[in-house]
Structures are given as C-alpha cells and as structure tokens.
Amino acid sequence: GISLIVPDMSSLMRWMTITMAGGIVAASVYVLLALQTRKIGLLRAIGATSKDIILYALSAVAYTTLAGIAIGFVLGKIITLTVIAATDFTFFEWLKMAGYDALLSLSGIAIPLTLGLAVAIWASRIPCAEVLRRE
C-alpha cells in the first residue's frame, strides 16, 4: 500500500492535468483558426453569422478534446493494467478506478470548451472585409 501521490494531492493533480490539456487544445484550435482566417472571412461573406462561426470553432474544440480523451483513456488504462501485476490490486479495484477516471475525463470536457469559447468569440469577430481586402 505505498501511494506515489498523497491522496489529498491526487484530485488536484488530476484537475491540473485536465486544465493544462484544455489549455493546449484551446491554443491548438486558436492556431488552426488563425491559419483559417481567409476561410472564416469567406464564410462571413457568404452569409455565415457569428453564431455559425462560434459553433464551427467549438466543434473543432469538442472533436479534438473527445479524441484526446478517448485515446488517452484507453492507452492509460492499458498501461495501468501493469499495476495489477506489480501490486496487490484486484481487477475489480482497477475497474472501479477506471470507472471513476472515465467520469472525471468526461467531466473534463467542460474546461476545454470554456477556454475554446474565448477562441470562438475571437474567430467570430473576424470581418469578411479584412480578408477580402488582402485578395
């Protein structure tokens, strides 16, 4: 029963990790949208509203986040199967821990979406005239 992380710090470490991952996702989507200003301007020129652009940006955040959660969760749980072999953990304890981690991971989608909302609002304010002026 030696714990690598003190139980009081375990929750803090998990939320810090989720927050950092959310920041990375939001920054990645910001770079993606910054490279697509021409596309966003053209969408605005053909009638896309600010709401449409916000939904476009938030969907990019959601797809990236859900893919990251799925891949990270599956690979993480495969790696933690070695914990069962190396310690006195039972499979049912591991399953209980996996269920808790799954709920925590899915609840963590709110952080990237919140951070991505700022990026989405920025993208929705790109005027079509600015893009068309460069052409």
Image: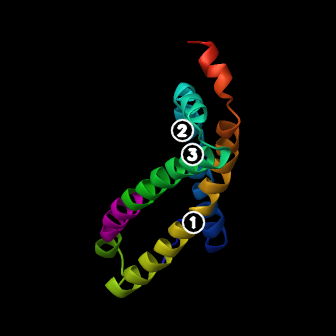
Q: Which residue is mark 1?
A: 5
Q: Which residue is mark 2?
A: 28
SS class of the residue under badge 3? helix
Task: Tell whether 13 sits left or right of 62.
Answer: right
The amino acid at mark 1 is Ile
> Distance of mark 1 from mark 3, alpha carbons?
37 Å
Residue 13 image offset from top left, x and y in percent: 61, 61
Q: Which residues are magenta?
A: 72-82
Which quadrant would residue 70 be assigned to in this image?
bottom left
Q: Which residue is mark 3?
A: 57
Residue 41 image offset from top left, x and y in percent: 59, 29
| Predominant secondary structure, magenta span | helix
The amino acid at mark 2 is Ser
| Viewer-side residue, 109 vs 74 | 109
Q: Residue at x 34, y 59 (%)?
A: 75
Magenta highlight on residue 98: no
